[in-house]
Amino acid sequence: MPRFAANLSMLFTELPFLERFGAASQAGFDAVECQFPYIARREDIAAALKQHQLPMVLFNLPAGDWVAGARGIACLPDRMDDFRAGVGQAIDYALALGCPRLNCLAGIKPDEVSDAEARATLVENLRYAAAELSRAGLQLLIEPINTFDIPEFFLCRTDQALALLDDVGADNLLVQYDVYHAQRMEGELGNTLRNHLARIGHIQIADNPGRNEPGTGEINFDWLLPFLDRIGYAGHVGAEYKPASGTVAGLGWLQHQLALRG
């Protein structure tokens, strides 16, 4: 059975950020991840990880002003300097926290930018980031995100992500496969995971519709999670979902999976 990482940007939000680490450990999670750790000092996060004996397995590169609607800047030609500065900040955090991989959000293409220019910008930024992360011993991930939740998000399908991997040509660049986003855009979860596992660096889960807990929607996680074992996925599975009625109240799926693990 896979090991599970609590996404602390979406789970346990009833608590202040630094208190969520202990809550995740108490709930039975093996690790944690988050979207943006930059809201807290590196030293404080590192202390929380050490206190609760949890690895941090993933977080995102800085993605612009999230509150103002930014969803990544990697495809924006006028933000390349900001992107590079964010890569440096993320590497500093990753090394301080022992986090082995960082996820890059492509962003929403402005109307005045052509698809070709946005893609060329994204490829150049990914080449830069992959090289910088490689020097630090880190993996870089790119994540397709569904365009129902984020209209016009520039990277929305697995085949697009795989083509970017080919064009960038970096050994440390892989796909972050979010089951929820993939189900909304293309389905075919099992075959996609099996056929492209060697190029997938991290997996996240939420059910559909609603992006709530596993077991609240149409995805058969009792089949999918053991399938990850059968095809040889050795990484953590990130629980990046919106609790339907409070984090702790919705953790029955995790207890069920832990019981199956024995």
Image: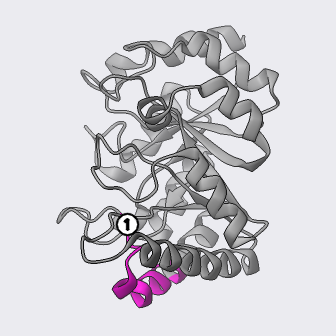
Q: Tell whether 109 sits left or right of 169.
A: left
Residue at coordinates 37% horizontally, 66% vertically from top-left? 72
Quadrant position of residue 138 = bottom right
The spot of residue 211 in percent (x, y) is: 35, 29
Q: Which residues are magenta?
A: 72-88
Quadrant containing the C terminus is: top right
Q: Nearer the viewer, residue 43 or 252?
A: 252
Q: Is residue 183 visible?
A: yes
Quadrant containing the N terminus is: top right
Residue 171 drawn in magenta: no
| Amino acid beneath label 1 | Gly
The spot of residue 117 in percent (x, y) is: 44, 79
Q: Tell whether 111 sits left or right of 247.
A: left
Residue 82 drawn in magenta: yes
Q: Nearer the viewer, residue 75 or 27?
A: 75
Placement of 111 over or under 180, stated as above or below: below
Placement of 56 over or under 124, stated as above or below: above
The spot of residue 140 in percent (x, y) is: 64, 64
Q: Residue furthest left?
A: 68
Residue at coordinates 17% horizontally, 66% vertically from top-left? 68
Colour scheme of the rendered structure: one colour
Q: Nearer the viewer, residue 211 or 112?
A: 112
Judging by the rendered image, the residue that carries numbered circle 1 is 72
The spot of residue 3 in percent (x, y) is: 66, 31
Quadrant position of residue 35 = bottom left
Q: Nearer the viewer, residue 41 or 38?
A: 38
Placement of 138 over or under 247, stated as above or below: below
Residue at coordinates 33% horizontally, 45% vertically from top-left? 147
Q: Tell whether 261 sits left or right of 59.
A: right
